[in-house]
Amino acid sequence: MLEISSSYEIKLSGTDIYFDSRRAVPLSFVSSANVDKLPRSEKIIATPETLKLLGKKVKSPAVLHSSYGKPFALGNYSIEFIPSGQMLGAAQIVVEKNGRRIIYVGGFKLKNTATAGYAELRRCDTLILDCVYGTPKFIFPNPKAVMESIFEFINGSLFEDKTPVILVNPMGKAQDMIIFLGERNVEMSLHPVMAKTLRLYEELGVKIPSYGGIRRKHFSNQVIIVPLSYRNSAVVENLKRKKIAVVSGRSMENGALIRSAFRAEVAFPLSNHWGYDEISEYLDISRPKNIIIRKNFSDSFTNKLKEDGWNVTALKEPKQLTLL
């Protein structure tokens, strides 16, 4: 049984475990390190990579970890973590009992990235999705094609004798992009927040190309990579000749709005979340009898899934479902 509260928290019945809880709970499974903050739960459980990348965001007195493909018992359930392809350490949680299987995905990505590897897909009875881009129009271009466009933007900016500035989320796709650019001998200067995260990736065994530091006085022939939240920082504002690009999956929906919000010349639709084509591929392989969707989605998204023959429960109303 899954218990779903009025705040759409999903709990595995008969246990203390919640899935990506947004409030303090006895035990929360954390699917990836791509979160702004974590509630102060009594315990959290995640992959070792996710826990390391979360760092000081973890306020819980107790942390538990399990690697991919290492089943363990929780009450009467068998639990296993498998890769989600979203970012380094990101995981799906597979729950089995009496021959039935639930998979909670959180976020996933089927289009391979440099640091996350491939998502693992399994058949299941019930699939639970956290929806980030919940409309059918979100079909993202190939990540490598987008990064080729970023590479062209950098070269064009340097040709104009301007410093290219890339604004990007510091966790996940930033590391994929840095590796891509490094393989093309692009000289990069990273904001300290970005550099700190990159060092953690290196400690986890990911090979990263050389890069500079943001405190250098001159950025001639270098691209500056800065977290989205530092758009208005002195590092960016004090550059006299610059050309700014923002990297955001949201630019698929409204590129002009994203460019305006970040005062950028161009926006690139690079995302480490799935698009509609990827959810279709996932469903074709997993063949769930039931699909549960929570977070950000539109009626057009759920209606399209229903038109395709899927049994969908959209968590817009408080409810409790008996599944196992």
Image (cartoon, helix red, strand yellow):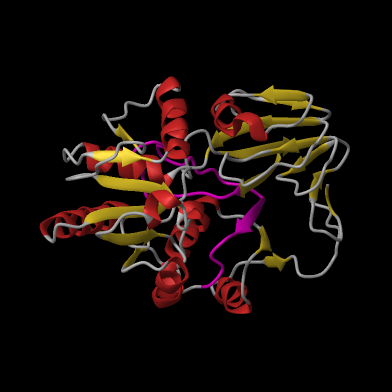
Task: Give the left or right position of residue 312, taking residue 91 as reference.
Answer: right
Name the residue rendered at 21%, 54% in the picture: 154
Quarter of the image holding residue 268? bottom left
Quarter of the image holding residue 206? top left
Give the residues in magenta.
106-135
Task: Give the left or right position of residue 265, taking residue 121 as reference.
Answer: left
Name the residue rendered at 21%, 59% in the picture: 153
Q: Nearer the viewer, residue 144 or 67?
A: 144
Residue 218 position within the rendered picture, expressed as x and y whole percent measured from the top left: 24, 42
128 falls in the magenta region:
yes
Which residue sits furthest left? Answer: 159
Instruction: Let me know if residue 304 appears in the view.
Output: yes
Residue 314 position within the rendered picture, expressed as x and y whole percent measured from the top left: 71, 67
- In this view, 9 is above or below 51: below
Task: Give the left or right position of residue 293, taking residue 4 as reference.
Answer: left
Task: Give the left or right position of residue 27, taking residue 284 as reference.
Answer: right
Q: Nearer the viewer, residue 175 or 85?
A: 175
Residue 125 position within the rendered picture, expressed as x and y whole percent measured from the top left: 66, 50
Q: Main secondary structure of the magenta part?
A: loop
287 falls in the magenta region:
no
Name the residue rendered at 46%, 42% in the picture: 119
Instruction: Let me know if residue 98 appears in the view.
Output: no
* Total numbered circles: 0
Q: Nearer the viewer, residue 202 or 32?
A: 202
Quarter of the image holding residue 14? top right
Residue 207 position within the rendered picture, expressed as x and y whole percent measured from the top left: 32, 26
Q: Nearer the viewer, residue 114 or 196?
A: 196
